[in-house]
Amino acid sequence: MSVAITLATARRIMTQLRHDRRTVALMVLVPTLVMILLYYVMDDERSFGRWAPILLCVFPFLVMFLITSIATLRERTSGTLERLMAMPLGRLDLLLGYGLAFGLAACAQVALALAVSLTWLGLDLPGPLWPLVLVALLNALLGTALGLLCSAFARTEFQAVQFMPIVMIPQILLGGILVPRGQMATVLEWISDVLPMSYAIEAMAHAVADADPGGEFWRDVVVVAGSAVLALLLGAATLRRRTS
């Protein structure tokens, strides 16, 4: 692994994103627009205040997974990845470069969604802002890492999109959003215990409810961050130069 090569890869991806306005709009604007739509659909500040933090956790996760998996697959199917890996570019360099570039995009995404929610939409937090920002950003990075991992197993962009209901939807359904995890069937609760989204949702709940997040919050944060790192390492181990 080379820091210089990783940074060069990140710069290249950022340059490509800058010239792809539709992708940038999808990444940065869609979560914010959905938050605005949710606010006016609910038309109730109390209900919005209950659901907004959860959606700030889920939407960046979904959007970054979708964009990252398709973008990485496009690199491979177009032959760009094969040419890059003919140079002194390691797999981990490539994925870390992608993770850094899309991580910066995730920062912009989360910052805009939070700014609009806290000002225009009047989201009120009983505690400090930084735990909510940390969890939202980590979840966006987790979506990025899982997108990079899943792209290694897809042959077409359509297949990359098909990973969303397989990887994303079970995590949302079993994460405790609709039904508390403790009230699920035992088998479903066991599955929920190994899904990183469960800990992200739980961390977001602590970030919103606790004025001073404690040990459980930091445990959940470590699990989410560790899951993102593990997904990147597995992605580097399974990355192929091209799709045949």
Image (cartoon, grey):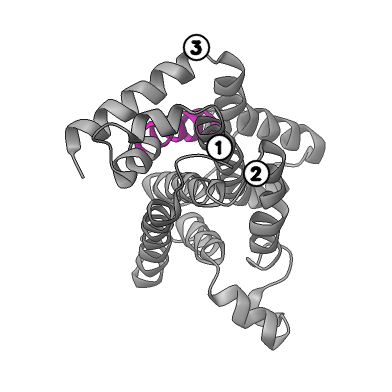
Quadrant position of the N terminus in the picture: top left
Q: Position of residue 172 (x, y in %)?
A: 66, 59
For marks 2 and 1, the one nearer the N-term is: 1
Task: Identify which residue is drawn at 61% across, 52% down.
Answer: 54
Question: Which of the marked residues, 3 or 2, is nearer the chain's N terminus?
Answer: 3
User: For the stretch drawn in magenta, what is the main secondary structure?
Assistant: helix
Q: Distance between the Cα atoms at labels 3 and 2?
A: 22 Å
Label 3, label 1: how far apart the Cα atoms are: 18 Å
The amino acid beneath tag 2 is Ala
Q: Which of 53 and 62 is in front in this view?
A: 62
1 in relation to 166, above or below: above
Q: Quadrant of residue 183?
A: bottom right
Give the label on residue 19, or none.
3
- The circle on residue 160 is 2
Q: Are marks 2 and 1 in contact (CB under 8 Å)?
A: yes
**Relative to 2, is 129 on the left or the right?**
right
What residue type is disc 3 on?
A: His
Specify start and end residues of the magenta stretch as a single range.
100-115
The quarter in which the C terminus is drawn is top right
Front one among 70 and 193: 70
- Read off the residue under disc 1: 73
User: Is residue 102 one of those drawn in magenta?
Assistant: yes
Q: For the residue marked with disc 1, what is the amino acid?
A: Leu
Q: Nearer the viewer, mark 3 or mark 1?
A: 1
Q: Distance between the residues labelled 2 and 1?
A: 8 Å
Q: Image height check: is 124 above or below 13?
A: below
- In percent of the image, x 69 and y 48: which residue is there? 46
Q: In this view, does 117 lie above or below 164?
A: above
